[in-house]
Image (cartoon, coloured by chain):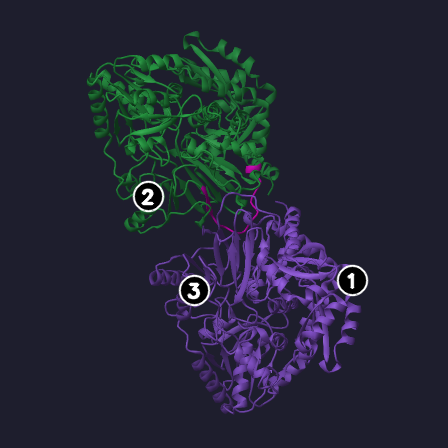
Chain colours: A purple, B green
Amino acid sequence: MSSKEYIKQLKEKIVELVPENIKIKNIEFEGPLLVIYVENPQEFADSGDIIRKLAKDLRKRIIVRPDPKSLKPPEEAKEIIKKIVPEEAQITGFFFDEENGEVIIEAEKPGVVIGKNGVTLREIMKAVGWSPRPVRTAPIKSKTIENVRNFLLASREERKEILKRIGERIHRGTIYEDKWVRVTFLGGSREVGRSCYLLQTPESKILIDCGVNVGNIHQSPYLYVPEIQPLDSIDAVVITHAHLDHCGLLPVLFKYGYRGPVYLTPPTRDLMVLLQLDFIEVAGREGNPTPYESQHVREALKHTITLDYGVVTDISPDIRLTFYNAGHILGSAIAHFHIGEGLYNIAFTGDFKFEKTRLFDRAHTHFPRLEGLIMEATYGGSEDFQPSRKEAEEKLLEVIRSTIERGGKVLIPTFAVGRSQEVMIVLEEAIRNKRIEEIPVYLDGMIYEATAIHTAYPEYLNSNLRDLIFHQGINPFISESFVRVDSSSKRQEVIEDDSPSVILATSGMLNGGPVMEYFKALAPDERNTIVFVGYQAEGTLGRRIQKGWKEVPLPSAGGKRDVVEVNMQVETVDGFSGHSDRRQLLNYVRSLKQRPEKIITIHGDENKCIELASALYKTYRVETRAPMNLETVRFL
Amino acid sequence: MSSKEYIKQLKEKIVELVPENIKIKNIEFEGPLLVIYVENPQEFADSGDIIRKLAKDLRKRIIVRPDPKSLKPPEEAKEIIKKIVPEEAQITGFFFDEENGEVIIEAEKPGVVIGKNGVTLREIMKAVGWSPRPVRTAPIKSKTIENVRNFLLASREERKEILKRIGERIHRGTIYEDKWVRVTFLGGSREVGRSCYLLQTPESKILIDCGVNVGNIHQSPYLYVPEIQPLDSIDAVVITHAHLDHCGLLPVLFKYGYRGPVYLTPPTRDLMVLLQLDFIEVAGREGNPTPYESQHVREALKHTITLDYGVVTDISPDIRLTFYNAGHILGSAIAHFHIGEGLYNIAFTGDFKFEKTRLFDRAHTHFPRLEGLIMEATYGGSEDFQPSRKEAEEKLLEVIRSTIERGGKVLIPTFAVGRSQEVMIVLEEAIRNKRIEEIPVYLDGMIYEATAIHTAYPEYLNSNLRDLIFHQGINPFISESFVRVDSSSKRQEVIEDDSPSVILATSGMLNGGPVMEYFKALAPDERNTIVFVGYQAEGTLGRRIQKGWKEVPLPSAGGKRDVVEVNMQVETVDGFSGHSDRRQLLNYVRSLKQRPEKIITIHGDENKCIELASALYKTYRVETRAPMNLETVRFL
């Protein structure tokens, strides 16, 4: 059945289900959404249950829009909304979200935008056509989010075409009688880095993640193999989270011709753009060839479709995708795929943390059904037990206290996204409760900007943190202890200042970024301390220092290499990791609502993947495998 | 490096290595061969060592031809050769073999064609340009061989173009820096039937076998998966032997656009054409849709390149193929692939017998190097021990003797190729040595024609049989005990004749063919016996009868189903199989010159593949795997 015939059938059903007074003008797919255009949207708006019922009966995500003729252009709509909403709401921004048919209204007091029992919202919809979604104005302005929203707004017309094309492709109908499910491992198997997996059925090809290799950025996933050639044979790309080893090479797909959708959570979209642009900027600055240009980042962005946790979405004729919280970083998701009508269910954990952290709830376990599981094994080795979060925090504070006593500085290399914010929350609380001295905490690299993005998505943080922010009025991210470093001169000041401080700087494994300057300056002085709070991959400078190298060669200005003496204290504080440790990995499988039939371990050094697969087999008698890159494993 | 540049380099080397008096006109690839055209081929012919030295230095298969201007057209060449060769040679046929640049001269006395110290051969070459190869006229004329040769001769010009294109493609040069080797299992894994495997490197795609599913001929290998799409991305197809579960769907590849080479041994080529044409003829006769037409069989034949055992041949920029004796049926081969320059070696056993049989030597074990092995597991189950060949022969004779005593007939369903000829040799010897009565042995279906092909390739039989034929003057295949059945009326005569006899008829698993008529007529009479000497796949009528079904429904003339009562004796004589039994499979791995690092078990029911993989792992501590169809296993 073609997409057109399918729409015809749906239309007939909808006409049957909808009250007679609602006049349906047109029905269209926009990406995974089914858009119903009606002449009198107010009738629809007044009876919210109809949409829910339709969605359930048709098993589609449904959005109702007024006939395009009466849909106000964004600029005009803005003015109308401003007139409707009382001034005390303090509207700070608008974002017209085409694929969801929404206008996001950013306000200091979103409650006022809603109005009593939603009366103001309904008024807005009737007046402008767009369905309004009020959100709280983020306490720190994110340049990235602003840019992303402006870009998407400017690409509005083109995006409409893209989404229409994607929608038609999703609903093209099935062809094959064969039923099977298999996954090809294109990167990130028996290694950490360049994560890339291809989920295939006879009907569909879904690419999950497309990352860089952290240890060697010139090593890509195996994108040239015939399974994914031509690239436009891929139905959809799914990004589990924004770290570069999972999404750093997404723009390469667009460079070489992919023009399909990219599914991700809203925070992942924004963080991803931030990190990708930084990735090519840093590479360019260091004179390295970049695998893609900023235009490809924008092309990818143009094809993004955001999904919140728990939203079930058709992404191909026989596959439905749902994201669930992975607890790893902001917006990180476990991607759950429902294949066929009840045929098979398979989930890719991406990186996940099965422990409640300062920022996030622990990873989701209660999938409706789950037969196949592809899980990370970063700490899957038989010895990979991490201290508890509490112990880790105690140790970090102890290291900071003793460095302060020596009059030294604490340098903490971190990813911009993830560990930085965890450590910030810990430090803010310790300073607030006077458990450490009130010293400045400098945030260099993109940490400040990444933190701004965190503040824009409070619904992606855990309940404790949301409670602290909204009900206790304490937003730890905007504490005065945090000082942004955004220039060379400011960085020099921080280095030359004689008093103790904590410096959080990127990159997390010392393979580039501003942390290098701090390291070079602070390493020779034995009063200072470098603290590793995250995983150091094989081949990185971080790993070498961690191993105890006393002299490390570093590239200097003139293209030569300086040898830096490492006299500073080198500390590793385990337990802050966003990855599950061995115990958490095993507990995760135990805690799943349904025990999978087959578990694949990936994203770990070779022995870790093998040891975890072996432990899972022995503990739960479930079939396990630790495949190599370029292998294909059949699930059904 | 392009094919042209490569030829230029080779030419320079050749000019350097060849004596000055030899005038090289041109150098060209023809398929895998490097053809050197010279003005004065007699000089070359007089110094045979130069070619050997060149081949060794250049690591190429080399053939020397006179400048095309002086290469006689076949018809003219025939007349010239007839004049040169003394009449007593009794020439019975010519075959101009383009890809090897040879004229095969079939004669009753090939020694006379050679002449003293090869003097006549040299004279022929000088006169006609073609390099002459005398062979003994087969004692039974094969219609198939004649047809194949005539077809290839008629396609001479087109084949020349095809071979040139193939040659250029083989020598196109390598592109990728990556080095890896993997195999995708497209059929025949954890099952018997539709064998099909894809060997891949970054540079090359080689398809090994392309068979039908014996139990369900409508089930193909997974030819639609992206790894082999488009089909013309395949560099070469390699056929291990002529049974339909290994080559029955080769023509489908040509139906859907493949136009590359098909490598196989000469007997496999002829047997394959015989069996493929029979396959579609039988299907057509039974009113079933056929997956291809005879034109596709011819198209495939046009693209065949035959290789004898032990000949090392470039088949892609980074892969060399060598066939070795597999001992399973006439021409059956183990396909050994040498990848890169000493990078990796992998062999596909195909079906193989690791025991000397009446017809063949046991399978080859002494590969120059071998790191990866893909082996069959038909009898890989932990209980799958077969009686010795001697015991099997005794039991068969005993069954025949007691059936003769009862005045009954012995019906032996067999594949046309393989078991038929084994049983024939046993029966001929038993009759000759008076161990059973001199009763007629009827050969129905294609058994007679298949036997004719056996007589044309004595060099593919084992030394005992060759000795019997050439030195003792006894050719068991042409014994007078064998009576050909080639018509319905003759078949009816055999059935109605009241005296005892042995009937060998196809198909071997009672899923069609003339055996059905015999079975229907003979089953109700308890004096008769049906003897199974080969493997009966799940889902076939043979398996049901073997299991003891007393009533079997059979389609009758009017489209209805008759129920046939089975009162005849049902006997299974194990030990005649062309497959290695459990002990032979294990011994084979032990006997390999080099122990492989990784062994994959295929071509067996699920539990047999798994049990053999497990036994090999436990016995030899080598990595093993029993993959599923659609999976990919990495070797390097």
Q: Position of residue B564 (x, y in %)?
A: 33, 25
Residue denoted by label 1 = A70
Is residue A467 depicted above or below A6 in this figure? below
Q: Nearer the viewer, residue B232 or B47?
A: B232
Q: Which residues are magenta?
A: B169-186
- Distance from disc 1 to disc 2, alpha carbons, whole Å, reads 69 Å
Nearest to the observer: residue A345 or residue A139: A345
Residue drawn at (21%, 17%) of the image: B433
What secondary structure is found at the residue carrying circle 3? loop
In the figure, is residue A273 to the left or right of B548? Answer: right
Q: Main secondary structure of the magenta part?
A: loop
Label 2 SS? helix
Q: Is residue A130 left or right of residue A172?
A: right
Chain ID, mark 2? B
Secondary structure type for disc 1? helix
Chain for numbered disc 3 = A
Mark 3: few, some, or many residues within 10 Å (few <14, many ≥20)? some
Q: Which residue is mark 2?
A: B608
Asked whether disc 2 touches disc 3, contact meaning CB atoms under 8 Å apart, the reply is no
Residue B76 drawn in magenta: no
Image quadrant occupied by the N terminus of chain B: top right
Residue behind mark 3: A593
**Of pointers 3 and 1, the one earlier in the residue sequence:** 1
State which quadrant residue B395 falls in.
top left
Q: Nearer the viewer, residue B217 or A342?
A: A342
Q: Is residue B185 magenta?
A: yes
Say whether residue B587 is left or right of residue B446.
Answer: left
